[in-house]
Amino acid sequence: MRILLVEDEPDLAHWLSRTLARQSGMVVEWADDGVLADRRLASEDFDAVVLDLGLPGLDGHGVLERLRARDDRTPVLVLTARDSLGERVGTLKSGADDFLPKPFMVEELEARLQALVRRSRGRDHPRLSCGPLSLDVGSQRFTVRGDALALSPREHAVLRALIQRSGEAINKQQIIDRVFQGESDVNLEIIEVLVHRLRKKLVGTGAQIVTLRGLGYSLEEDGPATEPHAADGPPVHVRPCLLYTSPSPRD
């Protein structure tokens, strides 16, 4: 899930980005003023936007108006200290999908974002899958053929980062930057240990972590195609992971 956070308070933005990435696997990108946010929203795709109203350059109302004027229906959650009834009603009428006043609990923000994205996609249970290995995006639960996969919190975070890349390579430093930013005790050696543990736990699941020389790690599905560039041993049989969602209910 790719989120654009539009917030001019650096400390809050960095904390939110780290927390949402660690707890729910969201990829959070930050814009610190309205002009930059408008430019990015006009040229890039995001699953949702977390938008502060009091922004330099172009305020949140202006960003929202321009977004909707382009007929862009990306879900927008407004996050602001302005909590009057008139402000809430006006913001929702101008095109916001939800409103959360500061201060807030990050668990509530996370739940509201997931609900907004589910509704916008028309899907109840989006999930990432790599063979029989699946990650339910809503519950953040890994299963193998329906059975829960026992993982430590850090193992879960690394595996989540791998499955989100859908068969693409991600290196150790990228894993640290993505899910362990700010945790000073996590280094490259720790990532190697976590990957080693995950490889053991994935034996027999139909998914495996492949080392791609010079590129990093990739979570791949066992299959008939041979990957000739895998390091660390003989060639392995791999297929890329996929994104699956349950079909929308029919009327």
Image (spheres, grey):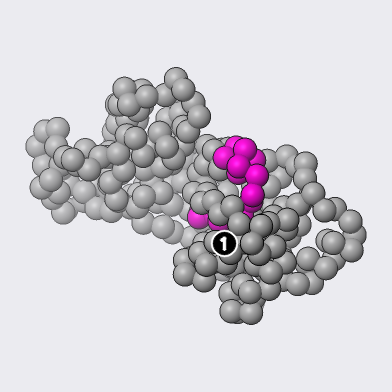
Q: Residue flagged by tag 1: what amino acid is it? A: Ala
Residue 164 in the figure: left or right of residue 88:
left
Does residue 175 show up magenta in the picture? no
Q: Is residue 13 left or right of residue 98?
A: left
Q: Residue furthest front?
A: 57
Q: Position of residue 250 (x, y in %)?
A: 60, 74
Residue located at (38% from left, 46% from top): 163
The local secondary structure at tag 1 comes to helix
Does any portion of residue 62 appear in the rendered image?
A: yes
Q: Residue 205: image x %, image y %? A: 33, 39
The magenta span reads 1-15
Outermost residue to the top = 185
For the C terminus, the image quarter is bottom right
Q: Nearer the viewer, residue 17 or 82?
A: 82
**Residue drawn at x 28%, y 46% as measured from the top left:** 169
Residue 161 pos. (x, y %): 41, 42
Q: Quadrant of residue 133?
A: top left
Q: Which residue is mark 1?
A: 37
Hey, which residue is sitting farthest right in the picture?
A: 85
Q: Is residue 250 visible?
A: no
For image coordinates 65% across by 44% down, the residue present is 9
**Quadrant in the picture for residue 159:** top left
Q: Is residue 55 above or below residue 210?
A: below
The number of numbered badges drawn on the structure is 1
Counting from the top left corner in percent of width and height, residue 6 is at: 61, 55
Residue found at x 36% / y 43% = 162
For this rendering, which residue is in front, 179 or 224?
179
Badge 1 density bin: few <14, some 14–19, many ≥20, Cα 10 Å: many
Tell me if residue 170 comes above or below residue 244 in the rendering: above
Q: Is residue 2 magenta?
A: yes
